[in-house]
Amino acid sequence: METTTVFQTKTVTAGDPGAQTVTVTKTETVTKAAPAGKRGKITIPTLFDLTGPTSEVGVEYAEGVNNAVKWINERVGGIPGVGEIELVFTDYGYKPPEAISTYDRYKTQFNLPLIIGWGTPDTEALAPKVAEDKIAYISASYSAHLDDPSKTPYNFYPCASYSEQARAAMVWIRKFWDEQGENRPPRLALAYQFGHPYTTAPNKAIKAIAQELGIEIVTEQDVSLRATDTSSQVLAIKGAKADFVWFGNTVGSASVFARDLKKQDVVAIMISNQWGHDENLVALAGEAAEGVHGASGHYYFGMEENAPALLNPIKKSVELFGRTFGPEDKFPTSTYIRGWLNLRMAALAIAHANAKFGEVTDENIKKAIEMWRQQTIEGNVVSPVTSTPKDHRPSTTSYIMKIENGKYKLVDVITVERRPDWLGW
């Protein structure tokens, strides 16, 4: 037996710009020589952003991961044939260099078959190392750049990519516009932080399909992830007479943007990417959130009729286990669901690797996921996942939603074609 130190981090005053990340350590004994599938527990290291520029969605996501672990351990009895999950997490503050050093520490410290990562900048930066080290990596980045296994063979995630969601949004715009009986092309503005791997990930896809569908892109505006005033960008969009705005950032700046749209009486319909809309948008933007649309790779809370698993086990897990990172008196937003789905995908991959190959290794996890054909992750919450050795796109189905009377309403479910020429972007 070899004694190793398991590092875990907790945050202090996450909303304070001067917040520090405090590292708490505990020592546990693990048998590194034993195959992962033969031991009574398995360590899954994760990266969270609890204090950085995406923490407004990162905290709720982390709650979902944490409670999914508790559910599997306490209600299911662990991963079948493998054992309980030990979750190890680090708040890396959305800093790619910190993510890389944390990855190196995880790799050295644990007998790793799998890591759950977070953002696009760090996931894309780590992709070559992940491929070289052959460690399965399930991210909260849904960048289509991670879909081509000839380039990123060990990267996975459980729902339609940012690009597939954006393509679905463009299809919806064209469909909505035609239903209005307009006889000119719809005018589209793009608003996002320029030069950022996450916010720009679907831009090539948006521009290509907009051209195919006859959607005119009239302006692109640079909006920081930490924006507190977007008046000038909104006035430029108003001047361009846009009918629709694709917003590519996260919820914090999305709420500022929505308020400024309303303040400037801009009638363009705002449609946000996956991380740019959840229930916090309603809380932060108030009446300005009315009519905002969003693309998503999964159903949201309030859509239990479409996906009963939202109620049990996902909502039930909050009732049973409460919250680790957020306020106890606030129910998590639908961002919580994404953390749950990532952990459930990891647990399924580990179980299937053990069942099919008799041992949980990184390569066996990869092979197990690549055998999935319409694999259910958690009920109907997310479309079934299909993955092959030549195509890691999990799904091409997206859900278009609208905020109406302060609640999310499902507008459309759109499945775009799995075109070979769209792989990897």
Image (cartoon, grey):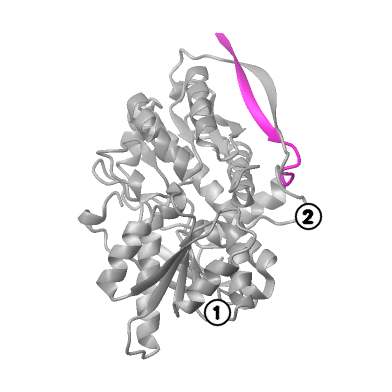
Q: Who is closer to the viewer here, 48 or 303?
A: 48
Q: Amino acid at mark 2?
A: Asp
Residue underneath mark 2 = 329
Q: Who is closer to the viewer here, 348 or 400?
A: 400
Residue underneath mark 1 = 266
Q: Position of residue 122 (x, y in %)?
A: 47, 38
Q: Earlier in the sequence, mark 1 or mark 2?
A: 1
**Bounds of the magenta segment:** 1-16
Q: Position of residue 385 (x, y in %)?
A: 37, 51
In the rendered view, would you say 23 is above or below 48? above
In the rendered view, would you say 44 is above or below 407? above
Q: Amino acid at mark 1?
A: Val
Residue 221 forms part of the magenta stretch: no
Q: Who is closer to the viewer here, 124 or 156?
A: 124
Residue 11 forms part of the magenta stretch: yes
Residue at image coords 47%, 71%: 245
- Is residue 404 visible to us here? no
Q: Position of residue 226 (x, y in %)?
A: 60, 53
Secondary structure of residue under mark 2 = loop
